Amino acid sequence: MTVDDDLLRYVLLSLSHDGTGAIKFGPTSVRVVCANTYALALNRDSKHIGDLGELSISHMGDVRAKLEAARAILNQANREFDAYANMANELAM
């Protein structure tokens, strides 16, 4: 989406390197490239991620249901990004 500047849609994915933790992800508008932008994405979007449904996928259990929940979260995130783009474009006019 573009509102005088390009805003891209990202999904923040984090996992432990040793496999002991769950895979966590949620939508964000911050491109994470270092610890600082990781912290920014977590702090900036914590309210929004909670609204959209942050998901933890452990290595056990019903993975298909978790993947379906992930699809639902991403679809909702796309709707939220679209609504934001429409509102920002209206304000820019």
Image (spheres, rainbow, N blue to C red):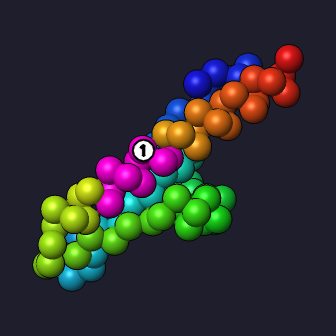
Asked where in the image residue 55 lies, by quadrant, the reply is bottom left
Q: Amino acid at mark 1?
A: Asn
Horizontal side of 21 relative to 74 (left or right) equals: left
Residue ID at (13%, 78%): 60
Horizontal side of 13 relative to 36 (left or right) equals: left
Asked where in the image residue 12 lies, by quadrant, the reply is bottom left
Magenta stretch: dominant secondary structure: helix
Question: In the picture, which quadrant includes the C terminus?
Answer: top right
Residue ID at (66%, 30%): 85
**Residue 18 in view of the camera:** no
Q: Is residue 30 above or below residue 24?
A: above
Examine the structure image and report whether residue 75 is included in the region drawn in magenta. Answer: yes
Q: Is residue 80 above or below residue 22?
A: above
Asked where in the image residue 92 lies, by quadrant, the reply is top right
Disc 1 element: helix
Question: In the picture, which quadrant includes the N terminus?
Answer: top right
Q: Is residue 18 above or below residue 87?
A: below
Q: Is residue 63 above or below residue 82?
A: below
Looking at the image, the residue that sits furthest to the bottom is: 20
**Residue 76 in view of the camera:** yes
Marks counted in the figure total 1
Which percent across, then down, holds residue 2?
A: 64, 21
Residue on which disc 1 sits: 75
Mark 1 residue crowding within 10 angstroms, few (<14) / some (14–19) / many (20+): few
Which percent across, then down, holds residue 5?
A: 68, 23
- Please provide the residue range marked out in magenta: 69-77
Residue ID at (22%, 76%): 58
Residue ID at (41%, 48%): 74
